[in-house]
Image (cartoon, rainbow, N blue to C red):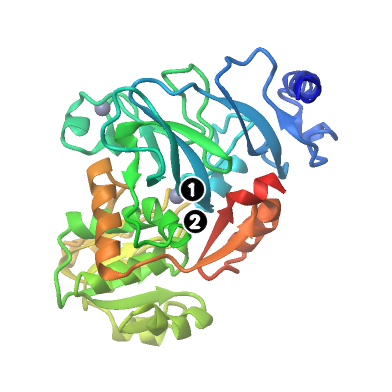
């Protein structure tokens, strides 16, 4: 045992030095592009040893990474991670497509696991509980947004599950592509025992991101609701909208997904590349949720709305999104709005709602070793509909 720990430390020290030396020249460094294991610098604050997968630069594959999680504080819960969903945001961040990625970057914010340790003040959870952690791990908890249960809009800056400054440790947060995580109790939700943990993992990002705007804009039974983009978010959105009683249409550029829409529970599907079909549905929708994660022209979707209705965008579209054509808004007093995940109470609410209505994400389970291949397949839209990493594969 002792000898093993010693050799691990030596490896960490060596590779920690490699990372530090390579700042600013990461793309040109053959070591960092070679798939070699990474580790935190040796002087990193200690806690509990953890392992996972990290990207070391925008163009590098994710590779094994050893690091530390903080020790469990009085209001913390330590979770052994069972499954973690693969969200398109993980890819945008690992590849620095939104800018601002701090490396090494451990993505992952659709975490489901078992509680293995609880702080002395914890009453809500006990060891052995199945729980989830979504996109947030902390917030100031006293601003107006936090007081209203909208921690995602924390006016002092929410702490996101990965690539976010961690006010407690002074480091950058590491996400769920790892064996364990330590999170303050308030940011952990319960997963009912009836919910399959791998299908439930995407509910804490894909589920809440689509449920929250449908609740906020008050989607009602019988309303005609369009879900644009039938991917990780969109396929869950179809199921949630259906459970809310809406008349749901999947709106997609993929002929294959038109065929799949009914299986997901949609009442109909629209191939958005077909101008004739789009024209036939003009001025008929009560609400449209747009889940496409890349820049694209919003105007054709706005034309589908009835007067006074809203199209909500939930993808963090990159800079070159098309300009809105004012005439497509003013003639029907339509609105284009945005929405970002949801607060903690609402995240618990969507998990409970999905349990009640038998909703799970459609998943393809992968070992962590396939993560780079999975990223390429997500970008090519070649997944039905969410990759979920089986974290037991980290041990193999
Ligand atoms: Zn996500
Ligand atoms: Zn706040």
Crowding near the residue tagged with mark 2, few <14, some 14–19, many ≥20 C-alpha atoms within 10 Å: some
Query: In the image, is residue 270 above or below residue 150?
Result: below
- Specify which label sits upstream in the sequence, 1 or 2: 2
Q: Which residue is rendered at x = 58% and y = 54% of the image?
A: 389
Q: Position of residue 369 (x, y in %)?
A: 71, 52
- Mark yes or no: residue 303 visible: no
**What's the CA distance linking mark 1 and mark 2?**
6 Å
Q: Specify the quadrant of the image occupied by residue 59.
A: top right
How many numbered callouts? 2
Q: Which residue is rendered at x = 35% and y = 20% of the image?
A: 74
- In front here: 177 or 267? 177
Query: In the image, is residue 213 above or below residue 226?
Result: above
Q: Is residue 259 left or right of residue 343?
A: right
Q: Are marks 1 and 2 in contact (CB under 8 Å)?
A: yes
Label drawn at residue 285: none
Q: Position of residue 277 (x, y in %)?
A: 37, 86
Q: Is residue 167 left or right of residue 309?
A: right
Q: Position of residue 225 (x, y in %)?
A: 25, 72
Q: Which residue is rendered at x = 41% and y = 82% of the image?
A: 263
- In front here: 97 or 356? 356
Q: Is residue 394 left or right of residue 385?
A: right
Query: In the image, is residue 100 above or below residue 322?
Result: above
Which secondary structure, mark 2?
loop
Q: Which residue is rendered at x = 34% and y = 52% of the image?
A: 191
Q: Position of residue 282 (x, y in %)?
A: 27, 79
Label drawn at residue 318: 1
Identify residue for label 2.
Answer: 294
């Amino acid at each position: 045992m002792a000898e093993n720990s010693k050799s691990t430390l030596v490896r960490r020290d060596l590779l920690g030095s490699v990372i530090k030396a390579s700042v600013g020249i990461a793309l040109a460094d053959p070591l960092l592009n070679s798939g070699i294991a990474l580790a935190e610098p040796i002087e990193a604050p200690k806690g509990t040893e953890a392992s996972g997968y990290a990207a070391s630069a925008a163009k590098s594959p994710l590779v094994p990474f050893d690091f530390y999680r903080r020790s469990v504080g009085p209001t913390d819960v330590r979770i052994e991670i069972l499954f973690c969903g693969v969200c398109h945001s993980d890819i945008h961040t690992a590849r620095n497509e939104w800018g601002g990625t701090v490396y090494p970057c451990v993505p992952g914010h659709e975490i489901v696991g078992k509680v293995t340790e609880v702080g002395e003040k914890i009453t809500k959870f006990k060891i052995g509980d199945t729980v989830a952690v979504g996109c947030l791990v902390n917030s100031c908890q006293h601003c107006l947004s936090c007081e209203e249960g909208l921690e995602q809009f924390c006016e002092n800056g929410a702490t996101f599950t990965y690539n976010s400054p961690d006010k407690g440790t002074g480091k950058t947060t590491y996400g769920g592509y790892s064996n364990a995580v330590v999170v303050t109790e308030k940011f952990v939700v319960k997963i009912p025992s009836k919910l399959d943990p791998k299908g439930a993992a995407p509910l804490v990002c894909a589920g809440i991101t689509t449920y929250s705007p449908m609740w906020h804009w008050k989607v009602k039974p019988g309303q005609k609701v369009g879900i644009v983009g039938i991917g990780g978010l969109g396929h869950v959105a179809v199921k949630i909208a259906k459970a809310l009683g809406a008349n749901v249409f999947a709106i997609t550029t993929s002929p294959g997904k038109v065929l799949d829409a009914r299986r997901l529970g949609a009442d109909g599907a629209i191939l958005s590349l077909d101008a004739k079909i789009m024209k036939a549905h003009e001025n008929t929708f009560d609400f449209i949720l747009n889940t496409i994660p890349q820049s694209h022209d919003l105007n054709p979707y706005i034309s589908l709305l009835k007067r006074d209705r809203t199209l909500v965008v939930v993808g963090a579209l990159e800079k070159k999104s098309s300009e809105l054509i004012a005439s497509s808004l003013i003639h029907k007093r339509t609105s284009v709005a945005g929405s970002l995940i949801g607060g903690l109470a609402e995240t618990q609410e969507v998990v409970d709602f999905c349990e009640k209505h038998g909703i799970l994400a459609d998943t393809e389970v992968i070992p962590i070793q396939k993560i780079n291949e999975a990223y390429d397949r997500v970008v090519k839209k070649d997944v039905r509909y969410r990759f979920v990493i089986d974290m037991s594969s980290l041990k193999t």
